Amino acid sequence: MRPWFVAGLACLSLTACSLPSPDKDADALAQRFVGEIASGADLSKDADVDPQLTGPQWVAQRASLQAMFPQPKPDSVKSTGWSINTKAGEGTRAELRYSYVYGKQTPVAATVVLRKPEGKTKWIATGLQAHRDAGPVALGEPPAPDSSN
C-alpha cells in the first residue's frame, strides 16, 4: 500500500485535518499574499505579486477583500484543497484553497491563484477570491470555473 494512500486515509479519519500542500513555496506565498490583503499592506512592495494587482483599478476589490478578514490574525488556517496544472508554453497555474477561522464568526473561504511562467522557478500571486456570508469578492485572476472554495 502506498504511503500517501495511508496518509490520506488517516487524514480522512480526522475531523480537523488540513490537507498538505503539494508545493511548500506555493503554500507560503499564498498564505503571505492573503495576509498582505488582510492587513492592507502595500502590494507594490512585494515582488511576488503580479504588478497588475497593485493598480488603481483594483482599489475597491482590495478594500472589500480586506474587510472580509477580521483583525487580529485568524485562530486557524486550514488548507481545504488545491490544484496544479502545467501547460506547455504557458507554465504552471496553481489554485490553493483555505479556510480562515476567526473565533465563532463564519469562516472565510479563500482561493489563491498563482502562476509560475515556463522556465521560471518562482511563483507569482495573480489572484484571490474570498467569500464569507455573501457572494465572492475577487482580485485579479479568478479560480477556474470548475474549482470550488
Image (cartoon, grey):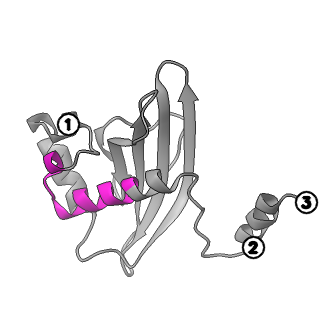
Q: Earlier in the sequence, mark 1 or mark 3?
A: 3
**Which residue is identified by label 3?**
1
Which span of residues is magenta-colored?
A: 29-45
- Residue 16 included in the magenta stretch of the image: no
Image coords of residue 8 (percent x, y): 74, 63
- Image quarter where the N terminus lies is bottom right
Marks 3/2: CA distance? 17 Å
Kindly identify the amino acid type of the residue bearing the numbered disc 3. Met
Q: Using the image, determine if residue 90 lies above or below residue 1.
A: above
Say if the magenta span includes residue 40: yes
Residue 2, picture quadrant:
bottom right
- Which one is in front, 26 or 106? 26
Q: Are marks 1 and 2 in contact (CB under 8 Å)?
A: no
Mark in front: 3 vs 2: 3
Write down the residue under mark 2: 13
Residue drawn at point x = 76 percent, y = 71 percent? 10
How many labels were placed on the picture? 3
Which type of secondary structure does the marked residue at label 1 adopt?
Answer: helix
Q: Using the image as rendered, state which of residue 83 and residue 104 is in the foreground.
A: 83
Main SS, magenta residues: helix
Q: Which residue corresponds to mark 1?
A: 51
Element marked by disc 2: loop
